[in-house]
Image: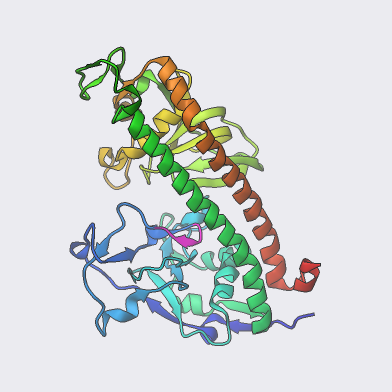
Amino acid sequence: MEEYKTYKLSDLVDFQNGFAFKSTDFLCNGKYKIIRIKELKNGLVKFFEDTASVLSDPDEIMSKFLVNKGDVIFALTGDPVNKSNPNSWVGRVSLYTHNETAYLNQRTCKLTNYRGVVPKYLYYFFRHYENFYSLASKATGSANQANISTKTLGETNVELPSLKVQNKVVDIIYSLDSKIELNRRINDNLEQQAQALFKSWFVDFEPFKGEKFVESQLGMIPKGWKVGTLSDLLDIRYGKDHKKLNDGNIPVYGSGGIMRLADGILYNGESVLIPRKGTLNNVLYVNWPFWTVDTMFYSIEKVPNVAKYCHLLLSKLDLASMNSGSAVPSMTTDILNKIQVIVANQDVFSSFNECISSLYLKAKINLDENKRLSETRDLLLPKLMSGRLIIKDLHS
């Protein structure tokens, strides 16, 4: 049996807090991206269209705030553990996997000067739900915002096996994560292909070049088509509270994606999910049983074969710019229903749906594989971390 020793995290690493950039420093297309709390998503650093950046090259002072590939980052501010979505909790850990160098913003910190510990092992230690929950539970603050200090982080107990075992554990878990990330990138590429087909059909009208075109509010369109509103194609409905649902295998979606798996089904069929609060541009397509919470709209087709069309249409719009909220970005059914759309003939919608269905099917296959890989990882992680599963037994 491998011997585990207990250390304080501060015995193993040092902490570097982020820099307090001013909002006036932020640019849209600067040289270096800024990693804020909002970029720490699902265990990784995710850059978005609105991710801030700066031009400043690192000098002797600023170089310590740089983040490089492989760095482990913590969110020192976030939701308290009584909020339902762990992906927004304070204390969540993320691994920086990008090749480009970035800057670390305030209320985040990175680990430095590792002593007798493999960086990715610490990352997975805090990805383990029990360890994450224990850390987040030590936060202080209000009902809506919790904070953790590097002092509290440093006092956290960490159980470690030998470096040899640490590396073997990391190899096993990281191989699963790498496959998950590969599938995610493949799906990003599939969505780009679908968007290119959408542009070809409904922006450039390439399949219809030989037909007669007429004027419309949205420019020239093929004769027989019309300009309508999103409400002509979709019935947009509100999500519902999920707190009384038991755990199960049905995905529950919020504006940030899947929040949990539950035993309730709100709708079972093709649907476009549109954020009502928060990350308004995160439009999703689903074609399986699901539940959406009250911060996420779902939709039902009024016209056959338009769900994928509407998903691609809404995904290329900047819904965040239509924000009706003040403190929290918000969307309304009134705004959505009035969005102007091109309404093609039914046979065109049917043909387009058939054309892109294979791309959506491939994406679904990758999503299903990622679900299995995630379940395998989450099953193995606590057993490998605790020594209850010996690596040689796993290989056998």
Identify the residue shown where x is 48% and y is 53%.
185
Whether residue 61 can be seen here: yes
300 or 216, which lies in front?
A: 216
Whether residue 301 can be seen here: no
Measured from the top left, where is residue 94 in percent x and y?
48, 65
348 or 369, which lies in front?
A: 348
Counting the numbered discs, the total is 0
Residue 234 part of the magenta-drawn span: no
The quadrant the C terminus occupies is bottom right
Q: Tell me: residue 86, above or below residue 207.
A: below
Measured from the top left, where is residue 98 in percent x and y?
42, 65
323 or 354, which lies in front?
A: 354
**Which span is picked out in magenta?**
42-46
Measured from the top left, where is residue 193 in percent x and y?
42, 41
Q: Quadrant of residue 361?
A: top right
Identify the residue shown where x is 58% and y is 46%.
366
Residue 224 in the figure: left or right of residue 234: left
Residue 329 in the figure: left or right of residue 395: left
Residue 33 in the figure: left or right of residue 11: left
Identify the residue shown where x is 52% and y is 28%.
270
Q: Tell me: residue 26, above or below residue 183.
A: below
Q: Quadrant of residue 245?
A: top right
Q: Tell me: residue 396, above or below residue 368.
A: below
The quadrant the N terminus occupies is bottom right
